[in-house]
Amino acid sequence: MIKEIKPTVFVVDDDAAVRDSLRMLLKSVGLPVEVFESGQEFLDADRDDRPGCLVLDIRMPGMSGLELQVKLNERHSILPIIFITGHGDVPMAVEAMQAGAVDFIQKPFRDQDLLDRINQALEKDAGSRRMLAERNMIRKRLESLTPREKEVLDLVVAGKANKVIAGDLNLSQRTVEIHRARVMEKMEAHSLAHLVRMVLEVERVEE
Amino acid sequence: MKTALHATRSRSAFRPASPSPPLIVSCTGLVVAHSPMSPAISATQEAPPIVGVIDSDPVARAALKTMLQPVGVEVMSFDTAESYLLSGSTRNLACLIVDLLLPGMSGLELLRRLRSNGNDVPVILLADESDVPTAVAAMREGATDFIEKPYVNVAILKQVQKLIRGQSGGGVIPA
């Protein structure tokens, strides 16, 4: 978690000229770039959990860009995909977007357009990763609770007062207060609202 | 397989040309669509899902209504985005089918307005002579589907049935 891997723009295109020009373009603005000539080569390189984004040609011999997208979705990759295509049509664009692509650009495009969209995709990726990291942290804190503390937490989040919780769990009010304080401490919650927000954040995803 | 799907979407023309599915009236008096698609929503449940249709062309509205009613949904039609917004029925629709080019507020503007108000009703946009950038913009704004005219009824029916069964077909994968 501590060492930050610099986001990389991955390019998958079967056309060597396109790969070269994209590599030069991206390098010229200081973005790390790695190029691949096929979807399979990209899958084999295991880059799909790296921070960054994927610039993907839609029509390629062998595995098409859309097929690679399906494979990446199966791997639960969150890498944002920008499709580029020479001759895309509306149904193809819609299909790609429905499958979660962040963008779909037709050639010829202006370099600056592509760079703008790449930057948007990188921002989106960074945002998703921050969110995932935060959820993982909340989950770890939840796991550190004892079964009793977890019970108290559930009732606190449900909006019940200490007195009611004491009745529900057949404990003294003082004991509930102690558990509750421990929960706040272990969850590193600075307020009841913060605690509730953290729990909902994780539960919403697990539903 | 993909090419086949695209072909179906654009091959035949919308409206009377493509026949509405033959209807079968079951013994309980329920009208059931006889189509190759999954079974119609059972009308024995509570209120039927409501599908909103916004199109300035009365012929298109009528055609969509004729097509959608047999699958067990109620159709509410509007001629403009403004009349839909003023109707007060923006919250309880199963989905919205919206023509992209409306007089006044366009389909895309309506979509933006709904999303910025936190309304995530599934929106299927219909478009004459569209282009890839418009379709991509619509999907980025949160459209569930974007179907070109002339389209076949099947594409719309499929998406509506998917939506009223509660499985959203589009958008971004939750991170």
Image (tube, helix red, strand yellow):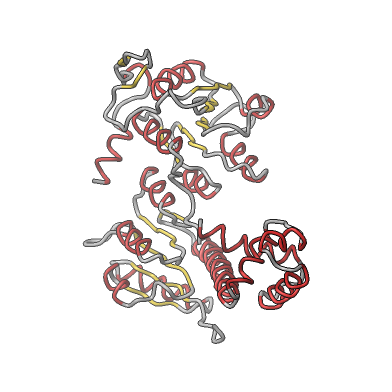
Residue A193 lies, with reference to residue B144, above or below; the image says: below
State left or right for residue B19 relative to residue B129.
left
The residue at the far bottom in this view is: A3
**Where residue B49 appears, x then y in whole percent?**
50, 28
Q: Position of residue B161 (x, y in %)?
A: 40, 34
Q: Residue at x 42, y 17 (%)?
A: B66
Number of numbered discs visible in the structure rendering: 0
Left or right: A7, with B157 as reference point? right
Q: On the image, which quarter does residue A180 sit in? A: bottom right
Residue in front for this viewpoint, B40 or B158:
B40
On the rendered structure, is A55 left or right of A1? Answer: left
Image coords of residue B5 (percent x, y): 28, 40
Seen in the picture, residue A181 relative to B77 is either above or below; the reply is below
Classify residue B111 by image quadrant.
top right
Quadrant in the rendering for residue A24: bottom left
Using the image, determine if residue B9 lies above or below residue B20: below
Observer-nearest residue: B114 or A64? B114
Residue B25 lies, with reference to residue B85, above or below; the image says: above
Is A27 on the left or on the right of B88, as rendered? left
Residue A95, how many percent across, how many down? Answer: 38, 48
Q: Residue at x 59, y 32 (%)?
A: B92
